[in-house]
Image: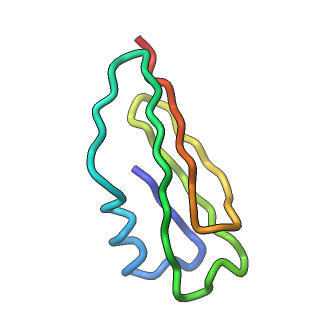
Amino acid sequence: MIVLSNHATRDIRARCAALGADAVVNEGATFTRTVNFSDGVDNGAAGWSYSVDYGDGTVVNGNVTTPSIDLSHVFAD
């Protein structure tokens, strides 16, 4: 699950729920994905905060100043 915030509108939150097809990753393998998004409300003037919950107890929080997040996570054996 990925959550973006910075005065996110209801439309942006709905689009965050559909950020791409599900991925299948074998144990020990690395999951990678680039998530691109748009925000016509503030156009990134203040940047965006995000939280990624990989579902295995790992949660990553961060900030970006461009509308793109590069994800990479190894799912342990």
**The C terminus, quarter of image:** top left
Looking at the picture, does residue 12 appear above or below residue 60?
A: below
Taking the spot 57% from the left edge, 48% from the top edge, the residue there is 70
Question: Closer to the camera, 77 or 8?
Answer: 77
Residue most extreme to the top? 77
Looking at the picture, does residue 54 appear above or below residue 6?
A: above
Report the side of 50 relative to 63 (left or right).
left
Q: How many circles with numbers are drawn on the protein?
A: 0
Taking the spot 50% from the left edge, 51% from the top edge, the residue there is 34
Q: Position of residue 75 (x, y in %)?
A: 44, 23
Report the side of 76 relative to 22 (left or right).
right
Looking at the picture, does residue 42 appear above or below residue 36?
A: below
Question: Closer to the camera, 32 or 57?
Answer: 32
Residue most extreme to the bottom? 41
Q: Position of residue 65 (x, y in %)?
A: 70, 67
Taking the spot 45% from the left edge, 82% from the top edge, the residue there is 9
Report the side of 20 relative to 42 (left or right).
left
Q: Position of residue 43 (x, y in %)?
A: 62, 83
Q: Which image quarter: residue 7?
A: bottom right
Q: Position of residue 24 (x, y in %)?
A: 28, 32
Q: Which image quarter: residue 11?
A: bottom left
Q: What colour scheme does the image use? A: rainbow
